[in-house]
Amino acid sequence: MKLTIFTPTYNRASYLQRLYDSLLQQTESGFEWLIIDDGSADNTEEIVNTFINEHRLCIRYYKKSNGGKHTAYNHALEYAAGEWFLCVDADDCLAEHAISHI
């Protein structure tokens, strides 16, 4: 695994579909999407499980109690499998060739 794309999230379920779609459009597939849920009270877990069950990307999801974005980063660094690490927030998306350029 070359790249870990890390997304910290807290009550951002409504934004995740756009990011997921942009990851599906990537021309390079050698990455994992690591999502650290910082104690969301919305349907983030349900949305992410839908993505996981599609088996279209390597997605790992961890939910923890709310502690702030900096604690989500600390967890992500423990779980990341990639040689490289890129944070992409839940309300962001990537251009089609972004990962191949990285």
Image: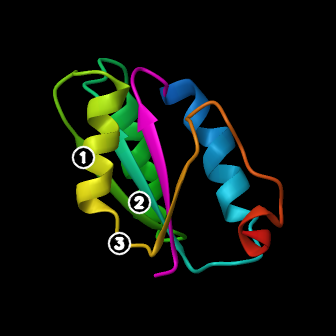
Q: Position of residue 37 (x, y in %)?
A: 32, 35
Q: Tell whether 50 sits left or right of 31.
A: left
Q: Tell whether 85 sits left or right of 21.
A: left
Are the residues at dot 3 and dot 1 in contact (C-beta closer than 8 Å)?
A: no
Could you tell me the amino acid type at mark 1?
His
- Specify start and end residues of the magenta stretch as a single range: 1-12
Sequence-wise first label, 1 or 2 = 2
Q: Secondary structure at mark 2?
A: helix
Are the residues at dot 1 and dot 2 in contact (C-beta closer than 8 Å)?
A: no
Residue 21 in view: yes
Q: Secondary structure at mark 1?
A: helix
The dot on residue 81 is 3
- Around disc 1, counting alpha carbons within 10 Å, would you say few (fewer than 14), some (14 to 19), or many (20 or more)? some
Residue 37 in view: no
Residue, disc 2: 52
Q: Is residue 5 magenta?
A: yes
Q: Position of residue 5 (x, y in %)?
A: 52, 57
- Around disc 3, counting alpha carbons within 10 Å, would you say few (fewer than 14), some (14 to 19), or many (20 or more)? some
Q: Is residue 34 magenta?
A: no
Nearest to the observer: residue 48 or residue 82: 82
Q: Residue sitting at 39 percent across and 32 percent down?
A: 44
Could you tell me the amino acid type at mark 2?
Ile
Q: Residue sitting at 36 percent across and 20 percent down?
A: 42
- Quadrant where the C terminus sits is bottom right
Could you tell me the amino acid type at mark 3?
Ala
Q: Rounded to the nearest whole Å, what is the CA distance between mark 1 and mark 2? A: 20 Å
Nearest to the observer: residue 95 or residue 44: 95
Q: Rounded to the nearest whole Å, what is the CA distance between mark 3 and mark 2? A: 17 Å
Residue, disc 1: 75
